[in-house]
Amino acid sequence: MNGEEEKKTNLDETKSRLESLDTLASVGVSKEDQKETPKASHTLASDTAHVLQEGGSKGAFIKKTIQNERRKEKEVAARSLTSKKNKFFLIGGTVFSVVAIIIIFVFIVPKKMTTVLPQLFFPTLLFSEQHKQIDITKTSPHKLIGTIRSEVKNAKLGVGDIKNIIFTQADDSGRRLVGVQEFLTSIEASIPSFLLSSLTEFMVGTYSSGINQPFIILRSSSPFRVYEGMSEWEDKLFTDFHQIFDLPTSGENKALFDKDFEEALIDNNNARVLRDSTGTIVLLYTFVDDTTIVISRNELLLGDVLDRLRIQSLTQ
């Protein structure tokens, strides 16, 4: 028997008792009938007769009892799920729950989950005070070069400080570091293929001498390939790097695209330099050792970078 059927049964029993009391009120209860009732048996009629024997108005008592029974009947009905009041609360609670679920899924739970990529270790060929990570996923060569120039220009560095720029790319497996061959291909450098295939490490950095300037370090696995490859690449170095190094190309500087590099001694290192019409060095490169190349645009920057590389090599 479920809850509704049980409550209905209680209502029927209450109504039956009320009918019995109505009958009792009309005909009365005799003392003889009360005496014949066994002491061990207690019914509503016997209890009523017992109270009447001890005094009070029989009609008034029965009327009060009827009122009490009717009150109980109303309380039972009020507890029923089918009552208007309980129906209101039941429907209201259901509507509130549905609305709450809709709010959670529409406004709280994000429609598109953003994949949090793991933090990567920042490799560097040179000790750096700062690091900057640039995502080159689906980035055009022109946009990538512009991003590097902007990062160099806007870097907040103390005089003599260096910022290491790290390039990353996202794919189906997560985020990964961009290697030297992929980076040079991404900026469409005209590097000889045999030199490109020998390169193993690189670094793009910003050095501050009061003015921020970029530099590039390349490391090869083959001394023979690095010397021969750089000699062949010289003709295209200015074309490949004039935008990253923010070199002038208007007026007389247009000739720099076709001008040859020449020998120079910088900080006791043999270097290859490109000079403008006034004799000022606008681009240079030197070999730190048999496999490491540094490309920059002035002597001061090159000297400080070389000093760091020498100190770093002694501490390794």
Image (spheres, grey):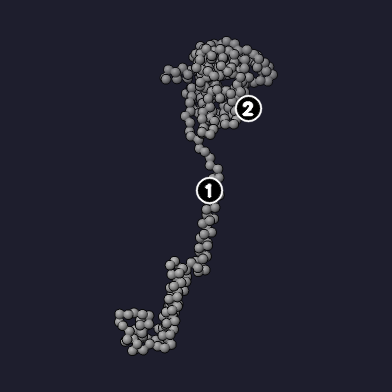
**Residue that label 2 marks:** 142
Gap between marks 2 and 1 measured at Cα: 39 Å
Residue 259 location in percent, x, y?
Answer: 64, 13
46 over 289 or under it: above or below: below
Among the 4 quarters of the image, the one containing residue 137: top right
Residue 242 location in percent, x, y?
Answer: 62, 21
Asked whether residue 283 appears in the rendered view, the answer is no
What element does badge 1 sit on? helix
| Outermost front residue | 1
| Outermost left residue | 39
How packed mark 2 is, by other alpha carbons closer than 10 Å (few <14, some 14-19, many 20 or more), is: few
Depth order, front residue of 14/128? 14
Depth order, front residue of 40/95? 40
283 over 10 or under it: above or below: above
User: What quarter of the picture does the N terminus occupy?
Assistant: bottom left
296 over 57 or under it: above or below: above
Amino acid type at image mark 2: His
The residue drawn where x is 57% and y is 28% is 151
Residue 246 location in percent, x, y?
Answer: 61, 23
Looking at the image, how many numbered discs can be counted on the residues?
2
The residue drawn where x is 61% and y is 27% is 141
Residue 278 location in percent, x, y?
Answer: 64, 14
How packed mark 1 is, by other alpha carbons closer than 10 Å (few <14, some 14-19, many 20 or more), is: few
Depth order, front residue of 217/254? 217
Residue 108, label in figure = 1
User: What quarter of the picture does the C terminus occupy?
Assistant: top left
| Outermost right residue | 251
Q: Name which of mark 2 and mark 1 comes first in the sequence.
A: 1
The residue drawn where x is 50% and y is 15% is 222
Depth order, front residue of 287/283? 287
Asked whether residue 232 appears in the rendered view, the answer is yes
What element does badge 2 sit on? helix
